[in-house]
Each structure stands twice: as structure tokens, then as C-alpha cells.
Image (cartoon, helix red, strand yellow):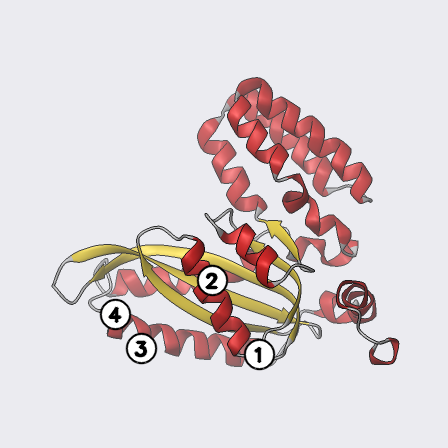
Amino acid sequence: MPEELFAVFIDAYHGKLRDENGKVVNISIFIALGIDMEGYKQILGYWIKQGRENTNFWIEVFQDMISRGVSKVGVFVTDDFSGLTSVIRKFFPQSDHQLCWVHMKRNLKREFEGKERKEMFGKLEKVKASTTKEEGRGHWEKFVETVKKYNPVMGKRYEERTENYLAFLDYPEEIRRYIYTTNAVESVNAGLEKMREDLGGYFPSQKSLEINLFVQLSNLNDMWMRKPIPKIRNNLYRLKQIMNVKFGIKEEEI
């Protein structure tokens, strides 16, 4: 596992599992996927949990990744999981933390409809299309004010997380689309969903789940290592400059 990664994506798949007592329980499978500086994707780990995530859980996840060699990460891309932001700040204080736009827009769809939703999504498109961070921040502030008009609590939440939703704008335009959502993990989640359906709607045991998950993730890793993401690889020099600023990499290493 490379110690230096351009991006790490963390997402969750929610399903059901028959536990050792024969009871079907709700579980979450958290997947961490990394993209290295050359544009190659690989699975960094997975963690199966019953109940809600919390700070202690994330500390265990990050200690696990660090113990296996991860030491420098340009940007973490995640959903707004409880307790995660503070843990990233603790273990990777130089790294950016981008919150997923797909999850954000799903939340907006559940809360708003019609004209209100259209107005918000229009402002978000202007943020995404911004050339500079400053321009994007201006459009984001207008989006936040619009949300506040209809739902002050929700608007305040987005305002407090401004830097996390705009982190992708600090990166070259050609690769921003790869880091404003956790979509990189979607192929894993799709495989888990198919696995669940094939098994009758839930995983029959944790051992069965882990065996099937190991096979699926191994196959994905083999496929990904044959072909890097071209636009990330083409921006290698610029990404190394960004990492140099974050972590003080020596000039001769660029």
C-alpha cells in the first residue's frame, strides 16, 4: 500500500446480516478506497459495523489504515458521517476533507421540491462550474442563503461546512469531477447490493459476507491496477506540487 495518496474515499453500504444468534440485524459496511499519485485505484480496507458510526469507530478505522502504511493523503472524500471530521483533523491535519455532493443533493431532494429545489440546484451548478475558489465561494454563499430562507437549521449546517464542500476547488479543473463525490466507491456498493439480492435479501453470516467481499474487492483491485485514471496521471506534476505544499516534500522528489 503506497504511503502517499492523492485521495481517499470513504462510503458506507447499508444492509442486513444474520448474526451468530440467528437474528437478522442492520449493518453498515464502510469501504475506504484510495487513488495514488499515478491515478491507480485500490481498496484500502473495509469495516463491518452494527449501529451508528461514532468517533471511537473512526479512530479504529484510521489507526488501521495508518498501521498498513497510509501516511500522506491530499484529500479525503466522505459523506458527513458523525465524528469523522474531527478524527481526520486529528490524524491528518494537513489533508483536505471534501464532503460528498451526491449525498448533499439527495438530502436536498428529500427536504425540498419544485421551485425551491430548482433554485438551490441552479446555484450549486454555478459553484461546480467556478474557475476559482473565490468565485465558487460567492455562489456557495448565495446557495446557503437560499437554503436558510426555507430551512434555517439546514442552511446553518451547510454554512458551517463551507470549507468541506468547497475543498475540490483547490485542485486542477481537470480532476475536480473525481473528488467532489464518493462515486468512486459506487462500483463496490453495486457489487454488495447484487450479492445481497443473490443471497435472498440479507447476508447469511458475517463469515459468508467477508468471504464474498474479499473475492469482490480482490477482483476490483486486479482490474483497477491494469488501468489508471488518465486525467489524474496527466496532472501528476501539479498534484505533487500540492502535496509538497501540504507535507513539505523535498523539491528533488517532485
Disc 3 marks which residue? 211
Q: Residues within 10 Å of mark 4 (few under 14, many from 20)?
A: some
In the rendered view, would you say 227 is above or below 19? below
- The x and y percentages for residue 128 are 71, 42
- Considering every residue shown, the one lying at the far top of the view is 149
Q: Which quadrant does the N terminus fall into? A: bottom right
- The x and y percentages for residue 176 are 71, 54
Counting residues from the start of the chain, the first of labels 4 and 1 encountered is 1
Disc 4 marks which residue? 206
Residue 69: which numbered mark, if any?
1
Under mark 2, the amino acid is: Ile
Counting residues from the start of the chain, the first of labels 2 and 4 encountered is 2
How many angstroms separate mark 1 from mark 3 (CA)?
24 Å
Counting residues from the start of the chain, the first of labels 1 and 3 encountered is 1
- The x and y percentages for residue 248 are 80, 69
Under mark 3, the amino acid is: Ile
In the rendered view, would you say 82 is above or below 106? below
Seen at 12% across and 64% down, the residue is 21
Q: Which quadrant does the C terminus fall into? A: bottom right
- The x and y percentages for residue 207 are 25, 74
Q: Residues within 10 Å of mark 1 (few under 14, many from 20)?
A: few
Counting residues from the start of the chain, the first of labels 3 and 2 encountered is 2
Under mark 1, the amino acid is: Gly
Disc 2 marks which residue? 59
How many angstroms separate mark 2 from mark 4 (CA)?
22 Å
How many angstroms separate mark 4 from mark 3 (CA)?
9 Å
Which of the 4 quarters of the picture holds residue 174?
bottom right
